[in-house]
């Protein structure tokens, strides 16, 4: 699957039933040697998405359970 196919999907945590963000507003952590995605890095925004604030949320690729048509379902209790 290409990044452009995943872009715009909501990221939802199945454990807490919470929306974490939209892919496209996130950064990717990529392994330079393999070229594989290792994690999504979701910034915390305030002021209607204009200013980054505080800690970022990092979701490891291994936490992804399903990439659907509209959303990405993750299974994670804690984040880095």
Image: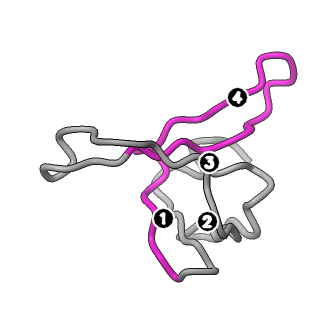
- Label 2 sits on a secondary structure element that is strand
Residue found 45% across the figure and 71% down from its top: 19
**Residue 35 sits in which quadrant?**
top right
- Going from N to C along the chain, the mark reached first, 1 or 4, is 1
Name the residue carrying label 3: 80
Q: Are marks 2 and 3 in contact (CB under 8 Å)?
A: no
Name the residue carrying label 1: 10
Q: Nearer the viewer, mark 1 or mark 3?
A: 3
Q: Residue furthest right?
A: 34
Q: Nearer the viewer, mark 2 or mark 3?
A: 3
- Going from N to C along the chain, the mark reached first, 2 or 3, is 2
Residue 15 in the magenta stretch? The answer is: no
- Label 1 sits on a secondary structure element that is strand
Q: Range of the magenta residues?
A: 17-43
Residue 9, compared with residue 77, is above or below; it is above
Residue 30, compared with residue 52, is above or below; it is above
Name the residue carrying label 2: 72
* Image coords of residue 15 (percent x, y): 63, 80
* Image coords of residue 45 (percent x, y): 27, 47
Name the residue carrying label 4: 30
* Disc 2/disc 3 C-alpha distance (Å): 18 Å
Q: Are marks 2 and 4 in contact (CB under 8 Å)?
A: no
Residue 60, compared with residue 37, is above or below; it is below
- Label 3 sits on a secondary structure element that is loop
> Within 10 angstroms of label 3, few (less than 14), some, or many (20 or more) residues?
few
Front-lying residue, 66 or 29: 29
> Within 10 angstroms of label 2, few (less than 14), some, or many (20 or more) residues?
some
* Disc 3/disc 4 C-alpha distance (Å): 16 Å
> Within 10 angstroms of label 4, few (less than 14), some, or many (20 or more) residues?
few
Q: Residue furthest left?
A: 47
């Amino acid at each position: 699957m290409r990044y452009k196919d995943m872009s715009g999907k909501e990221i939802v945590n199945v454990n807490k039933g919470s929306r974490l963000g939209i892919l496209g507003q996130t950064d990717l952590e990529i392994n330079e040697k393999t070229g594989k995605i290792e994690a999504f890095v979701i910034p915390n925004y305030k002021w209607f998405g204009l200013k980054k604030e505080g800690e970022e949320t990092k979701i490891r690729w291994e936490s992804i359970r399903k990439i659907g048509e509209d959303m990405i379902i993750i299974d994670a209790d804690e984040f880095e």
